[in-house]
């Protein structure tokens, strides 16, 4: 019965796409509603909850002091982890990190890192000996498609309101995390010959290909991640990039609270 329902749903969503429509009435280049709540975890150095439609993600930031990497002795360290809680979806299971959670963490981490969002050199305590280590923990509360963009917005929002606990390490007064850029990811999927951004779960589950593009405020592409077995033409990739730049500027204003 589940296979029959799945096939019926696939045919329905595909037919709508062929007609230029989406299951929830949005345009192909339209995001679902976005709401962001900052500072909800008092025990964290920074936190944010993002609701993208019915997808619900929380990001928390913890900062400790540790040894720098040998090749970057004067720079702080960023590490990102994602957890897909079983209560968020029947397809999520408890246990070791799944390939999906690892990919999610890597895509979010790459967008932050490659955009140079944080001035990591300002996180050096003692050159070559001690730096601040930033842990970004992402928890998926409810899954209804497009975790990449929801998780990215949650992580970026949480980092943007993070305070470095310098006084805990006798390194002076606490200070705001030096954020110098606000990266925004935009994920698009291909269903048949149609490209649509911010896929809901029904769209994501039948998509042929997926592309996530992270851009910065200067209009530069900083990271890209291709997913699923299908392919995009060069023209489709160029169109997705242009759409990501436009929507990135719009969503950036939401993240910054403008």
Image (cartoon, grey):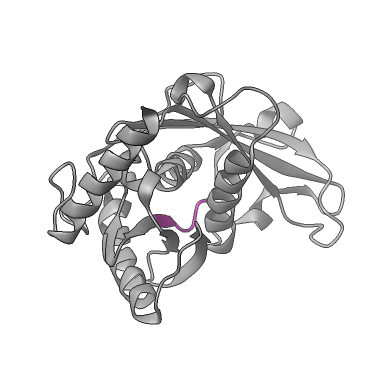
Q: In the image, residue 124 lies at what x, y percent?
A: 73, 50
* Residue shown at 59% from the left, 25% from the top: 93
Q: Is residue 54 above or below residue 247?
A: above
Q: In the image, residue 140 lies at what x, y percent?
A: 48, 30
**Left or right, 206 with reference to 95:** left
Q: In the image, residue 6 lies at what x, y percent?
A: 34, 37
Q: Is residue 51 visible?
A: no
Which of the two residues, 236 or 31, is positioned nearer the viewer here? 236
* Residue shown at 75% from the left, 31% from the top: 169
Which of the two residues, 1 or 152, is positioned nearer the viewer here? 1
Q: Is residue 99 above or below residue 44?
A: below
Classified by dominant secondary structure, the portion drawn in magenta counts as: loop
Question: In the figure, residue 84 lies in which quadrant?
Answer: top right
* Residue 184 lies in the magenta stretch: yes
Bounds of the magenta segment = 178-185
Q: Quadrant of the N terminus?
A: top left
Q: Is residue 42 visible?
A: yes
């Amino acid at each position: 019965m589940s296979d029959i329902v799945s096939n019926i749903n696939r045919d329905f969503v595909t037919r709508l796409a062929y007609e230029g429509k989406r299951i929830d009435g949005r345009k192909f280049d339209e995001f679902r509603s976005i709401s962001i709540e900052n500072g909800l975890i008092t025990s964290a150095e920074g936190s944010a909850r993002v609701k993208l439609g019915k997808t619900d993600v929380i990001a928390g930031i913890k900062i400790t002091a540790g040894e720098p990497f040998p090749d970057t002795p004067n720079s702080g360290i960023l590490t990102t982890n994602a957890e897909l809680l079983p209560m968020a979806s029947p397809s999520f299971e408890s246990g070791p990190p799944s390939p999906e959670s690892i990919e999610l963490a890597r895509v979010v981490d790459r967008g932050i890192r490659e955009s140079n969002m944080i001035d990591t050199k300002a996180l050096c305590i003692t050159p070559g000996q001690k730096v601040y280590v930033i842990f970004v923990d992402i928890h998926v509360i409810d899954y209804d498609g497009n975790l990449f963009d929801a998780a990215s917005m949650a992580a970026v929002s949480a980092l943007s309101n993070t305070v470095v606990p310098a006084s805990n390490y006798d390194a002076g007064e606490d200070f705001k995390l030096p954020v110098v850029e606000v990266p925004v990811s935009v994920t698009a999927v291909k269903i048949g010959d149609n490209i649509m951004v911010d896929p809901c779960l029904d769209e994501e589950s039948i998509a042929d290909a997926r592309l996530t593009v992270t851009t910065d405020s200067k209009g530069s592409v900083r990271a890209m991640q291709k997913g699923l077995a299908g392919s995009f033409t060069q023209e489709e990739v160029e169109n997705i990039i242009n759409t990501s730049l436009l929507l990135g500027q719009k969503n950036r204003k939401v993240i910054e609270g403008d």
